[in-house]
């Protein structure tokens, strides 16, 4: 009788240990998954920010180049007009 009770207790302890082990495994797996998801999210965010920054820089450079070109064209046109006017008054 006592032996059977002890055996049951051992089985119960083993079962508890096993359940604890399984729970620990699940917890570790969940933590690892969460860490991976967080890392992926961070990487995605960084990549998106980098892409947005690059696009903004390219757009700014394009705008600056266009403005410079327009200014140059305007200046050339003005100079040509002034030359033409001077030549006409001669």
Image (tube, helix red, strand yellow):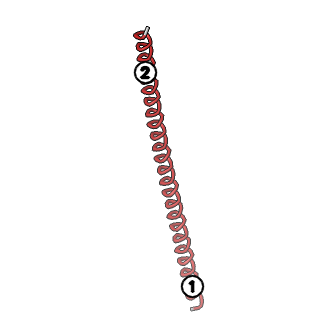
User: Which of the pair 10/83 is nearer the observer?
Assistant: 10
Query: How many numbered marks appear?
Result: 2
Residue that appears at 50% across and 64% down: 61
Q: Name the residue that disc number 2 marks.
A: 13
Residue that appears at 47% across and 42% down: 40
Residue that appears at 45% across and 44% down: 39
Image quadrant in which the C terminus is located: bottom right
User: Which of the pair 55/76 is nearer the observer?
Assistant: 55
Which quarter of the picture shows residue 63? bottom right
Residue lying farthest to the bottom in this orientation = 90
Image quadrant in which the N terminus is located: top left
Q: Which one is earlier in the sequence, the residue at label 1 or at label 2?
A: 2
Residue lying farthest to the top in this orientation = 1
Element on which disc 1 rests: helix
Q: Position of residue 58 (x, y in %)?
A: 50, 59
Q: Name the residue that disc number 1 marks.
A: 82
Residue lying farthest to the front in this orientation = 2
User: Which of the pair 46/73 is nearer the observer?
Assistant: 46
Q: Position of residue 47 (x, y in %)?
A: 47, 49
């Amino acid at each position: 009788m006592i032996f059977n009770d002890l055996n049951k207790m051992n089985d119960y302890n083993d079962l508890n240990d096993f359940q604890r082990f399984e729970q620990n495994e699940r917890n570790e797996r969940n933590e690892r998954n969460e860490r991976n998801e967080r890392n992926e999210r961070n990487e995605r965010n960084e990549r998106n920010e980098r892409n947005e920054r690059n696009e903004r820089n390219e757009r700014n450079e394009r705008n600056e180049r266009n403005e410079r070109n327009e200014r140059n064209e305007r200046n050339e046109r003005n100079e040509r007009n002034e030359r033409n006017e001077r030549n006409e008054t001669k």
